[in-house]
Amino acid sequence: MKKSNNLFLVSGTRKWRLIPFMVVGIFIFSQTSALELNYFLKSYLLIMEINIAFLCLYWLSLAKHKSDR
């Protein structure tokens, strides 16, 4: 098998890497559910906001990983 040089596997913080995604997801869900829109728009906004937030978190973690090298 190929050796993985993933930062999370090497540093032992593998179980903590999902915490930022969970926090962002909970925050976005709570903010979107408080809106007075129909269900279709709420669902669409929720999906779009979570996708954008995950991309931003991914880019931030990638930049942090590159700066740690």
Image (cartoon, helix red, strand yellow):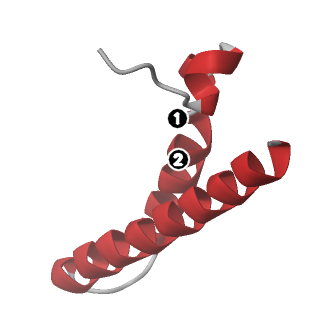
User: Would you identify the image quadrant in which residue 38 lies?
Assistant: bottom left
Name, please, the residue furthest toward the front: 2
Say which element carries label 2.
helix
Q: Residues within 10 Å of mark 1 (few under 14, many from 20)?
A: few
Q: Is residue 50 left or right of residue 24?
A: left
Image coordinates for residue 53, horizontal then vertical, percent: 52, 67
Image coordinates for residue 18, horizontal then vertical, percent: 52, 35
Say which element carries label 1.
loop
Residue type at numbered disc 2: Phe
User: Would you identify the image quadrant in which residue 60 lies?
Assistant: bottom right
Q: Residues within 10 Å of mark 2 (few under 14, many from 20)?
A: some
Image coordinates for residue 39, horizontal then vertical, percent: 19, 77
- Note whether 29 is above or below 41 in the view shown: above
Q: Quadrant of the C terminus?
A: top right
**Front one among 15 and 29:** 15
Name the residue: 34% across, 80% down: 45
Task: Tell me the CA gap for discs 2 and 1.
Answer: 5 Å
- Note whether 54 is above or below 44 in the view shown: above
Residue tagged 2: 21
**Front one among 50 and 5:** 5
Name the residue: 82% across, 43% down: 68
Name the residue: 35% across, 21% down: 2
- Note whether 6 is above or below 66 in the view shown: above
Labels 2 & 1 near each other (Cβ < 8 A): yes
Q: Is residue 10 left or right of residue 51?
A: right
Name the residue: 73% across, 52% down: 66
Q: Quadrant of the N terminus?
A: top left
Residue type at numbered disc 1: Leu
The circle on residue 18 is: 1
Name, please, the residue furthest toward the right: 68
